[in-house]
Amino acid sequence: MKPIKQYYSNIASQADLDKHLDSVYDKEKSNVFKLAVDFAVLIERVDGNNEDQTIKFKYLLPVDASSERRAPLEIRSRDNINVYKQYLRTVIGSMQERTNTDTHEKIVSIFSIMLFVFRYPLVGAAIPSLKQHIKRREIYYVECKVNLCFWTANSFITMPNSKDKRWQDCSRIAEAKRIFSRVNGMEFRDSYQGFDFVGDIDNFINKEQVNVHMYTYESDPPHYELTQNYLVND
């Protein structure tokens, strides 16, 4: 999986690192995502002995491939970001203490950071494996001008179509708004910005008593891969 977005920042202290993490969370908190990291570092190399030494410096910039060495963390809340802050403190400490005895190189400075965001895809273009479902009329398009996609999809559970009855869009939208009101304890407003998967999913599954399973589609070989389970009272 490739990162959807990258966030770069120069850092001179732990406070700079914390500020950058908070900023990324504020921008991405409406998404379900994983976070990975790599650093830009200054490396010192010492050749020779105490009487005749040659000291050279080089730098390495952050790259996506290096981020895989550090376990990505799923971010669902501010608490997850705080855990990640503590984790990065440990990573930085171990980086600065380590010296490669074979090459006589050590990291003497960390001067920038790149955060890689991997979002779970929630919507997208139709994929080939869906064709059979489209032919069976198991996938439906509902004309709606407000952000009711998630709630409209759930209406197919509470108000399914049948061979004898296919609900019109206006009826389905009305049902979606009823579900919204039941779960959130308030009337739906047209200014609603849409379902916040990170902040809203726990309340939804516990109120409706349904489990939500998220899959991504991989094309080589073609298959669905389970990426996340949201379970009642988990």
Image (cartoon, helix red, strand yellow):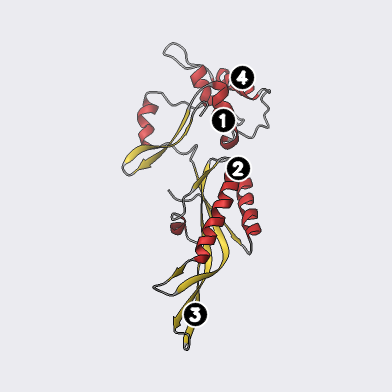
Residue at image coords 67%, 29%: 190
Question: In the rendered image, which residue does mark 3 sit on?
Answer: 56
Crowding near pointer 1: few (<14 within 10 Å), some, many (20+)? some
Q: In this view, does 197 lie above or below 104?
A: above
User: Which numbered marker is on residue 202?
Assistant: 1
Please name the amino acid that badge 4 sits on: Arg
Of the two numbered discs 2 and 1 on the same chain, state the one appearing first in sequence. 2
Task: Determine the CA span between mark 4 and mark 3.
Answer: 68 Å
- Whole-percent x and y of residue 139? 44, 26
Dot 4 or dot 1: first in sequence order is: 4
Mark 4 or 3, closer to the camera: 3
Which amino acid type is marked by label 1?
Asp
Could you tell me if residue 115 is visible in this image? yes
Residue 161 picture location, percent across and down: 46, 16
SS type, badge 2: helix
Quote the CA–CA distance across marks 2 and 1: 15 Å
Can residue 143 be seen in the rendering of this structure?
A: no
Element class at badge 4: helix
- Which residue is denoted by mark 2 in the rendering? 79
| Position of 117 relative to 163 (above/below) | below
Badge nearest the viewer, 2 or 1: 2
